[in-house]
Image (cartoon, helix red, strand yellow):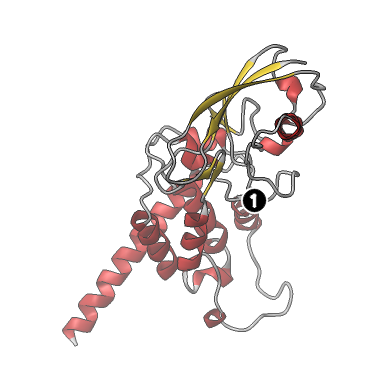
Amino acid sequence: MNFKLKIWRQKNAKAKGGMVSYDVTGISPDSSFFEMLDTLNQQLIIGGGDPVAFDHDCREGICGTCSLYINGRPHGPVKGVTTCQLHMRSFRDGETIHIEPWRARAFPVIRDLIVDRSAFDRIIQAGGYVSVNSGGVPDANSIPVPKHDSDSSFDAATCIGCGACVASCSNAAAMLFIGAKVSHLALLPQGRVEAAKRVQSMVARMDELGFGSCSNTYACEAECPKSISVINIARMNREFLHAKVFSEKEKIIRESL
């Protein structure tokens, strides 16, 4: 298979970038998208050029680093897969493929196709965990959890933090990411202890980092490689509203004493 690639090239965070065209030939339809990019980079290195910088790690669809915008869609044309799980048989022979980095103010471009997604790490640091303050570790199975809650929590926990939800949203919102992280802890007894503090801290950090508000178009759910449901956004909103009301009540009680 032969392809014409139009790839975003940018030397560094401060440099002005642009689309550059390349031709790759003899690509196997069973090659992964990254194997195709590896072939291109081999050609560039042999020709004395600079290879295209792109992020990758596990190449098994579980680490979330393979964040590429392909032909106008996060992770490419196939639903429910990451870029590293995408194969060239998903494209037509001779097709022109546009490849870009995530586009969001909170995800600045570092070089070529690599963006700084550490904003997600800072949101997690704001409260996406269960701390030691929630108590000691109970014996296994000593706390009963309803199956519906455990299933919903597990579904939310499959989020790999790739940022496709942000890239697909017209407002570059991180609501699905935060909704998933809030949900998978809030649905479990261990996570309820810090639920109110967690959701307020994570939402505040999200706003501070420059993510937009939810666009309500469900684009995030449609493009999420793990098919995380927007139900988690609704749950996060309920958790946030409950936390705000509860904190206001506490404030009134303290002031009345």
Q: Residues within 10 Å of mark 1 (few under 14, many from 20)?
A: some
- Image x and y of residue 93, in percent: 73, 12
- Image x and y of residue 132, in percent: 56, 81
Q: Is residue 35 left or right of residue 231?
A: right
Toward the left, the furthest residue is: 256
Return the residue nearer the eye: 145 or 15: 15
State the residue position of label 1. Answer: 158
Return the residue nearer the eye: 53 or 175: 53
- Image x and y of residue 235, in percent: 45, 52
Q: Quadrant of residue 29?
A: top right
Q: Quadrant of residue 164?
A: top right
Q: Is residue 187 left or right of residue 52?
A: left
Q: Is residue 145 left or right of residue 166?
A: right
Toward the bottom, the furthest residue is: 257
Q: How many marks?
A: 1
Amino acid type indicated by mark 1: Thr
Quarter of the image for the C terminus: give it: bottom left
Q: Quadrant of residue 236?
A: bottom left
- Image x and y of residue 58, in percent: 74, 49
Compared to residue 32, the image places residue 200 above or below, namely below
